[in-house]
Structures are given as C-alpha cells and as structure tokens.
Amino acid sequence: MTITKPMVSLLLALTTSALASGGREDDGERSRSAPLDPFYVEECGACHVAYPPGLLSRESWRAVVGGLGRHFGVDASVEAQLGAQINAYLQAHASPRASDDREGRPWLRITDTRWFRHEHRPGEDGLYPGVFESEAVRSPANCEACHRGAAEGRYGEREIRIP
Amino acid sequence: METIRACVLAAAVVAAPAWAERPADFLQRFESQARGEDASFRASAERGRSWFDRRHGGDWSCSSCHTGDPSTKGRHEVTGKAIAPMAPAVNPERLSSERQVRKWFRRNCKDVLGRACSAAEKADVVAWLIAAGAPTGARR
C-alpha cells in the first residue's frame, strides 16, 4: 500500500481528535473517544453498530471478547488472531471507569451501565416509553435507529432523530 | 517499464482468486465436496429455498434475519440492524470472498442449526442465493 499525503493527514486528524477527547470526564463525550478500527467494524459491526469502545471498561470488553462463541445467544466467534487484535483495540480505548454491577461483575451490555440508563431515561431528548420496543427501533442495541451517524461513530445531539 | 507493467499484471492475475471469487466458484466447490458423500448429488435452488425458510429445531431460520427473499434487505432478529441483501445479483459483495463465506456459514449455521452445515446444505443455499434476484430461467 502506498501511503499518500491525504492518508497521513487523515491519520493525524484521527489521532489528534482521539488525544483531545481522551481525557474528558464529561459522560456525553464518551462515545467520541476513539477512531473506529476497521477490523472491529468488520467483525463486530455487521450484526450491530460498532459500539464506541469508551462505553465499557477494560474488564467488560475482556469478558465480551472472551465470550464471543456465545454472544447473547449468537455465535459471534472470530479467528484467534483477529480476536486478540480486536481485544487490544478495545482495551486501548476502553473507559477508565469501572462498568460493573453491585457485585463487581463486569457488565457485558452497554445498555446495563449507569451511564446508558441515565442518558436514555424516559423523557430525555424526546425518548418516549416503549420507544426501544417499537417496530422501528426494536432493541436498545439498535443505536442507528435514532443516532443517524452511529455507523460512522457519531452520536452528537444534532444527529438524533427518534422514529 | 514494460517489465514492471507485466509483473504488476501477472501479480494481479495470480492474486485475484484470493480476494475476489465468483458465486459460481462456491457453488462448484460445495457441490463437489457434497459429491464426495453422494456421487449423484446436484445442488438445488428450490431445496435451498425451503431449507432457508425452515427452522431446524431452534428459534430461527435463515429467513428470520435475511427474510425469505434474498434480493431484499434483511434485519437482525436481535439487534434490529439492517442486513444487506444476500443475493449476489443485487449485492455483488455476496459470495465474493472465501473468508467471508467461511465465517458466516460457521457462525450462522451454529445459530440456526446448532451444528455446522453440510456441504450439500451449503451448495443448495448458494444455488438459491444465486438464483434469487437473477433473471428467470437461471434457476434449477
């Protein structure tokens, strides 16, 4: 592969934005914490949005990647080398905060975390009761149903449209 | 310069099968594997269609997520995410990569059947996906 000037600037831009947002404490900024890794997107983003790695802790991601053979009832297994690579990416960009339940067990679902439940409480940004079960959304895992830029890693308020 | 051009061309020709295969290559491969078990085996799009639509002892069929019409978009049963059409006639990315075909049969057969698919099952499904959305007359 030839490395072109635009590619270098893109890479620099991605790195700079990752560094700039990495240290922020604001919960609303979590989803912008890292550029999306192409292997992560290909392997994990086929069945659901490639969730921002900053939404779970290292322990949570380790548990998720370690259990891909039976991933919420579905076989999401990846080849060993790819699995290690994806885990390394997730570990590098995971949230520094714990994402675990009261017994200290790592959450496996982003939707179980206190952050998610707070940001998506009924009434917030026009969320109505039953929205996650509606035909257009079907599951809180379906970020794209409302966050129209989710596939590209954008979750800003301007791109929220609740069906 | 000419030598370089020739080398590049040769490399491209040699490398091509690794990343771009044709749907018919998969049909042929699975069909010949299935013939190892049953010499008279011939893939059937019709058998593939009904197999695709049927549950095999579990909660899902292939069509639970992909719909019964491979030329249209599907939707993941659990996450609600849109799935691009399975028929190569409308989605040229399908049945074009050995790695992808291997991966998705491995994962999805386990989800739907609770086991690996046989070569005959794969041959029938591939025949069905090729036929779906293709001009009529292509089916067999």
Image: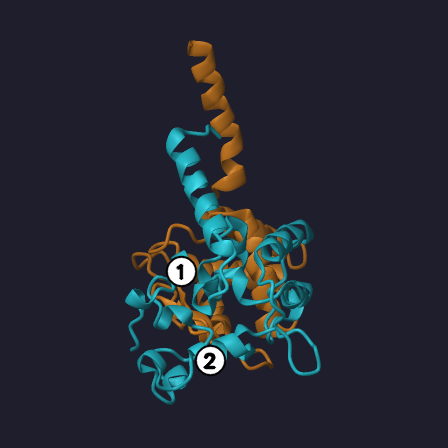
Chain colours: A cyan, B orange
x and y percentages locating residue A153 in the rendered image = 42, 58
x and y percentages locating residue B88 in the rendered image = 39, 54
* Rendering quarter of residue B41: bottom right
x and y percentages locating residue A107 in the rendered image = 62, 75
Where B79 sits versus B138, above or below?
below
Q: Secondary structure at mark 1?
A: helix
Front residue (pair A16, B51): A16
* Rendering quarter of residue A61: bottom right
Nearer the observer: mark 2 or 1; the answer is: 2
Where A24 sits versus B52, above or below?
above
Q: Which residue is mark 1?
A: A151
Q: Which residue is mark 2?
A: A118
Residue at x-position 36% and y-position 54%: B91
- Output the chain of dot 1: A
Residue at x-position 49% and y-position 76%: A116
Residue at x-position 49% and y-position 18%: B7
Q: Does mark 1 fall on the same chain as mark 2?
A: yes
- Output the chain of dot 2: A
